[in-house]
Image (cartoon, coloured by chain):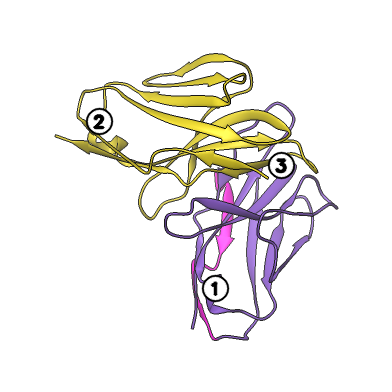
Amino acid sequence: NAGVTQTPKFQVLKTGQSMTLQCAQDMNHNSMYWYRQDPGMGLRLIYYSASEGTTDKGEVPNGYNVSRLNKREFSLRLESAAPSQTSVYFCASSAGANNYGYTFGSGTRLTVV
Amino acid sequence: GQSLEQPSEVTAVEGAIVQINCTYQTSGFYGLSWYQQHDGGAPTFLSYNGLDGLEETGRFSSFLSRSDSYGYLLLQELQMKDSASYFCAVRVSTGGFKTIFGAGTRLFVKA
């Protein structure tokens, strides 16, 4: 009963380094999302994938890229990390259609120094 | 663009009822959701309103008025474990379906 699994849970990067955050869901959901959460600002949508093979920009896509590898997996890449990208990153999935609730992963706490 | 307004903090007493309001301005509005998040945890889905009216799920109820661009979450019989942040979120259909979150309301439940 894993739901949405994110790796890693914690990461410290130096400015300019790159990394990929991994996300996988085992609920056969069509849609997947990446959000970042900063103190006092709620969750902001970075990128989303409405279905396998499609990706779209959200509210704050600059500095990020995504890949919907297959129906289960949706990765987020930081090509050149900046201190402004220090945040908690959440991956989420939803079945779409008439099921509107999102299931979130446990998050990745990223610090860029 | 999209904007959501909700109070930053609410305090209530154990056993009481509390209402968290949310107003929104958005294009392509499809529905309003509510999520709960405990400190250090992930958001968890509470409810969704696609049509006007009240939806009830146990101690929690959610209301939507599309004409007023307004909704609320009602928590009854408050328990200490209800201390958490609560987010309203709008489902919009611009450029595909996605959900935009408000900044959240921190609820403190006192004994």
Of B92 and B34, nearer the camera is: B92
* Residue A8 in sight: yes
- Crowding around mark 1 (Cα neighbors within 10 Å: few <14, some 14 to 19, many 20+) is few
Do residues under tags 3 and 2 come within 8 Å of each other at their CB atoms? no
- Residue A42 coordinates in the image, percent (x, y): 49, 50
Decide: few, some or many residues near mark 3? Use Cα within 10 Å; few <14, some 14-19, many ≥20. Answer: few
Residue A103: x %, y % from top left = 57, 42
Q: Which residue is mark 3?
A: A28
What stretch of residues is rendered in magenta? Answer: A1-14
Q: Chain of mark 1?
A: A
Q: Which chain's colour is yellow?
A: B
Q: Secondary structure at mark 3?
A: loop
Residue nearest the viewer, comparing B52 with A11: B52
- Work out whether A49 lies above or below B48: below
Residue B67 falls left or right of residue B41 = right
The residue tagged 2 is: B79
Q: Which residue is mark 1?
A: A84
**Residue A27 visible (yes or no):** no
Q: Is residue A86 above or below residue A26?
A: below
Q: Position of residue B3 (x, y in %)?
A: 58, 42
Q: Given this view, does label 1 or label 2 mark the residue nearer the observer? A: 1
**Residue contact between numbered discs 1 and 2, judged by CB atoms under 8 Å:** no
- Chain coloured purple in the rendered structure: A
Three-letter code for the amino acid on which mark 3 is drawn: Asn
Three-letter amino acid code at the position of disc 1: Ser
Q: Secondary structure at mark 1?
A: helix
